[in-house]
Amino acid sequence: MPEIVVEVENLVKYYPPDVKAVDDISFDIGSGTIFSMLGPNGAGKTTTVEILEGLRNPTSGSAQVLGADIFKDYSKIRKRVGTLPQNFEPFDLLKPWEAISYWASLYDIRISKKEIDRLIESVNLMDRKNLMSKKLSGGEKRKLGIALSLVNNPELLFLDEPTTGLDPKARRDLWNLIDIIRDKGTTIFLTTHYLDEAEKLSNDVAIMHKGKIIAQGSPDSLVEKYGKSTIIVLEGAGKAGLAKLKEIGISASIDEIDDRNVLVEVKRHSEMKATMARIANSDVPMNDIYTKRESLEDVFLSLIGSKMEDGVLKE
Ligand SMILES: Nc1ncnc2c1ncn2[C@@H]1O[C@H](COP(=O)(O)OP(=O)(O)O)[C@@H](O)[C@H]1O
Ligand SMILES: [Mg+2]
């Protein structure tokens, strides 16, 4: 069993008069893993993070962070925790190396020029080292934010929506960076409303909705538990292909998104090989054949009943 770094039990946060931002959640985070809290805007992610960062008191429940009780002992572990707040903006007029030096001083850390360079290099900003922060791109600002959050060499790092609003390339860059930080042994608590991000990065995901965790587990286990099945796509098979499959006793349907394609749903993984073989041995007309696994996106849709775009649920 890996060491437990964060242990949350029955946590509740109530904002008067009537907002239950966090409504009785429990979870553990194992050392060296990435735990993602995935949910739409207003789900209660930031409130949870701020409680675990020691910035906010919960209404009830308990939580241990790095072995310390968050009510009594947070001061003992504060220096072992790093944070990137939501919508982080670095100071406009400081250059990256100055911002890092300033941040270190807030933590009472004496930081050498070499160490500053190492941090800047670790987030790939060496060519921006002497540029005022206001000149950095959105992605570069977040990278600088991550460099600042690493200044105290934290064992546990909170990243609250680190990639929100960034373009796809900048998001992928940050994913790589986050992966590397985890590989070096730092435990990461990430919040996101991007399903692909949670699926790509997390060891464990908690899907949060209206203050409650409605499902949690590894991305694979969630897909297995809440997803439907694997789909075989027969590209270009069309109506003729559908008829042919019916003849050999395989139930199939026309793809709603592209009616040139025929879909065969395989409910149990153990049936996959045999079904593929039967299709291959028939002369169903098609251009291509491949399988499509369900993703966290399908899990989310089946659990919440609507899709999410930019953190907003679509009715
Ligand atoms: N300081 C606050 N006072 C009152 N309500 C708040 C406060 N902060 C957040 N909320 C409310 O709590 C709920 C959860 O917010 P938040 O934790 O920011 O969610 P998320 O980070 O998932 O978007 C929302 O309904 C939000 O409006
Ligand atoms: Mg938030």
Image (cartoon, rainbow, N blue to C red):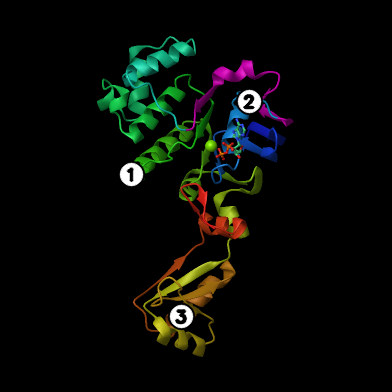
Secondary structure category for the residue under label 1: helix
Q: On residue 279, which mark appears?
A: 3
Q: Quadrant of ligand 1?
A: top right
Q: Which residue is mark 1?
A: 169
**Magenta extent:** 59-86
In this view, 34 is above or below 231: above
Residue at (39% x, 39% y) in the render: 176
**Quick check: can you spot residue 262?**
yes
Q: Is residue 75 left or right of residue 110?
A: right
* Quarter the C terminus occupies: bottom right
Q: Is residue 230 left or right of residue 3?
A: left
Amino acid type shown at disc 3: Ile
Q: Are marks 3 and 1 in contact (CB under 8 Å)?
A: no
Q: Is residue 55 left or right of residue 262?
A: right
Q: Which residue is mark 2?
A: 56
Q: Could you tell me how far apart the alpha carbons at marks 2 and 1 are, in whole angstroms?
A: 34 Å
Residue 220 position in % (x across, y down): 56, 53
